[in-house]
Amino acid sequence: MSPPEALQRSDAILDRLLTLHPKLIDLSLDRMHRILAALGHPERALPPVIHIAGTNGKGSVAAMLRAGLEAAGEQVHVYTSPHLVRFHERIRLAGALIDEGALSALLEECEAANGGAPITYFEITTAAALLAFSRTPADYLILETGLGGRLDATNVVETPAMTVITTISLDHQQYLGETLGEIAGEKAGILKRGAPCVVGPQTDEAMDAIERRADALGAELITYGRDWQSWEEHGRLIFQDNGGLMDLGPPALAGRHQYLNAGVAIAALKRLGCDDEACAAGPALAQWPGRLQRLRGGMLADCAPEGADIILDGGHNEAAGKALADYLATATELSGHPVYLVCGMLKTKNAADFFAPFDGVARRVYTVPIPDAEASFSADELANLARSAGLYAEACQNVADAVYAIGASAEPGARIVICGSLYLVGATLREYGPTPG
């Protein structure tokens, strides 16, 4: 079977799986328990699990944990979502992305075990991932929640080795609750008795909800500000806990927020027993496509102003907008080059709140629809929301047209940021950039 034909096989199966439930999201664990029982309970045959929940930073922390554990000589499985270009990115088996033959066979096995019963796309594909992880030896499984925690499809592991909760902010309120306390309570649903939990920086409201859940279970919390802290100092990453202070080079992932994510990862690696070398390697070696990722060469670079810096970032909520705007403001102050946003967003997100931090940072916003996303704002709708946040905005048909418009008017060295949704970043990478690996 040639590679193109093989890729079509898994795509066809995934398309069928989308039809098994009328809703894309329907939070419940009943369907997961049913299909896992039919598959022989693969969730009970996993390597030690590090279960991660949170609003922002889950993927970055997962990447740092993987890099640190692999530096320590461990074999590591990783499950993340969503993917950018190919579904295969979600399932990493002992260091390598799952191959097409294995993925197709697993999906067909899960489809047969499900027997046509209602089940969401994320649930049945998570079951396939757990089946893969149960059959391939590894030392650890880094398991990222899809949405929330308590009723997330990944929350079927009864005895994880560790849980991690990254910073919680407002997102997915229609599923998780309207307040930070309610959302944090849902995400704290991954806590388990006997499993330590590393907790990143939180508001008081979110921390109160996490502590209530931990107290009810008797779960140990290793919290930012009390048990550990991390910060940037003269471009260095500083981490401190009861064991002392570590003075490290900057994280490989760009942005000031990554110094805090690095602290979460280091605290977790230390609790797992990793030495200082492995703890340092996690932030230093981590790679995570679609987060302040630079696009090198290709058609978009040809359309852009000479010497332009093209950046892809999939952040899509208010907290992510603040982090991105902070990074761009600092970069602009250092370089003097203006910032242009090319933005597409889903209607489930609060676009006005995302745009607000860019007032005074972005010279202009070019809005685009997200290809093949029914829930995408139209370019005109999104442009109006950007204008309501005080930004100058212009609607375009697609990313290439937006970059061409920037290239026609901007001076050399402009910074072009394609942002607002991981789905837009993925579509851009599929059309113009390298496939994540």
Image (tube, rainbow, N blue to C red):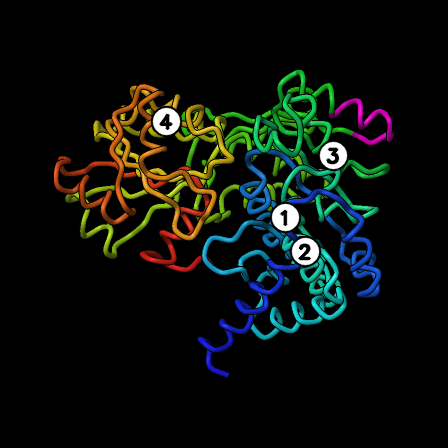
Residue behind mark 2: 126
Place of residue 250 in the rendered image (x, y in percent of width and height, measured from the top left): 45, 36
Which residue type does callout 4 highlight? Answer: Leu
Place of residue 308 in the rendered image (x, y in percent of width and height, measured from the top left): 21, 42
**Which is in the foreground here, disc 3 or disc 1?**
1
Foreground pick, 397 / 353: 397
Residue 431 on the magenta segment: no
Q: Which residues are magenta?
A: 210-220
Foreground pick, 98 / 424: 424
Place of residue 91 in the rendered image (x, y in percent of width and height, measured from the top left): 60, 59
**At 45% across and 48% down in the image, what residue appears?**
373
Q: CA distance from mark 1 to mark 4?
A: 27 Å
Q: Earlier in the sequence, mark 2 or mark 3?
A: 2
Residue behind mark 4: 385
**Which is in the foreground here, disc 2 or disc 1?**
1
Q: Quadrant of residue 326?
A: top left
Of the numbered discs in the image, which one, if any, rests on residue 23? Answer: 1
Apparent side of residue 280 relative to residue 383 in the rendered image (left or right):
right
Residue behind mark 3: 197
